[in-house]
Amino acid sequence: MKSTMTERDKKLLVGMFIGVIIVAIGYWGILPQIKAYNSISDKIVKEENIKKINELKLLNVGTIQIQADDYESRIAEKKDEFFQILSSSEVDKMMTEMATSNNLDIYDLSFKVPTTPSERMAYKNSQLYNIQLQQMAAYQDTEAATSAESDVNDPSLGGTGVSAAPTKTPEEINAEVFGEEEGGYRPNTDIYAVPVTMTVGGDLDDLENFIDDIINSDKRILMVGYSWGEYRNLIRGTTSEEITDAVTDSSEGVTAEEDAAVESLKTKKSLTVKLEIYMCDTTDVNTDGEAVEGTETEETETGEE
């Protein structure tokens, strides 16, 4: 059979063939090179930023060392205001000694030692609380954006491995070298708050001294609230050797049988306080701001006494 292809058809076929070749060369040849070029350009920009930061660090190594020493000293000074990480038995002993040293009777003591740092927020109707919420939201948005960018740039997570070329201003580079401005929100990773509820009884002067000891403690204790009450000690028996004490809440009153057996009725003032004891791991720094090597953090016990 003879071909009836015209000259026009031949030219069209050749043109299509050339077009396919051009597309193939562009897709499998030129496009990968463009992607590789963009990736290398991004790496060059990143390395230039790192170079600028390292040059600033070299030029200001003395200033940075002074700043680091100052931070260490300030951290040590602040940490010294907190209690060392205490176990349940140590918290119980401390509160018991604080009460008995003021000649007080202990009617109730309950607390729970936390295993994780305690996030504290200001009073919810205060201006500081709103500022904290704004700072927290901004911090979480920054963390989420950083995480998303990391996922995009990580090929193992389905990312392209290619990111937009980062550009940093001199102010951002200085902030990276010398640290960002203080006062922004940071999640708590060091401070543990032990909530304590304690009821003690005794003379009014001793109870007031007990409150003063809490307020004037050289370590951080916050009195969240307190309330006054009364406890009645019913002393009964026929001889002094047989006298026994029975503590009865004043709101319950005294029955007729109890009233007949009472030889002495003494009412004591009682005080119920709610506290927060703040602890911090201080084994890695001392009061001079120098790191302490070779120490291990005591494992916190949990429980309720």
Image (tube, grey):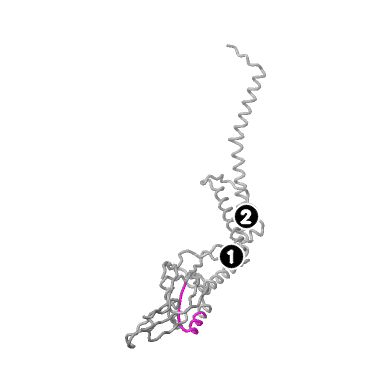
Residue at far front of view:
256
Q: Quadrant of the N terminus?
A: top right
- Image coordinates of residue 141 in percent, x first then y, are 59, 55
Q: Look at the image and tell me whether residue 114 can be seen.
A: yes
**Residue at the disc numbered 2:** 49
Local secondary structure at mark 1: loop
Asked if residue 244 is positioned above or below residue 7 in the image, the reply reads below
Most extreme residue toward the bottom, as rendered? 240
The type of residue carrying mark 1 is Lys
Residue 76 x/y as whole percent: 53, 71
Can you see residue 178?
no
Depicted 16 relative to depicted 302: above or below: above
Q: Image quadrant for the C terminus?
A: bottom left
Percent across and percent down for residue 22 are: 63, 31
- Between 91 and 59, the one lying in front of the other is 91
Calculate the distance from the C-alpha at mark 1 to the C-alpha at mark 2.
Answer: 42 Å
In the rendered image, residue 208 lying in the magenta stretch gets the answer yes
266 to the left or right of 217: left
For numbered disc 2, what is the local secondary structure? Answer: helix
Q: Residues within 10 Å of mark 1 (few under 14, many from 20)?
A: few
Give the magenta range. 197-211
Q: Earlier in the sequence, mark 1 or mark 2?
A: 2
Q: Nearer the viewer, residue 205 or 14?
A: 205
Q: Name the residue that disc number 1 marks.
A: 124
Q: Is residue 94 magenta?
A: no
Q: Position of residue 15 (x, y in %)?
A: 65, 25
Q: Quadrant of residue 69?
A: bottom right
Residue at 65 percent across and 16 percent down: it is: 6
Q: Which residue type carries mark 2?
A: Asn
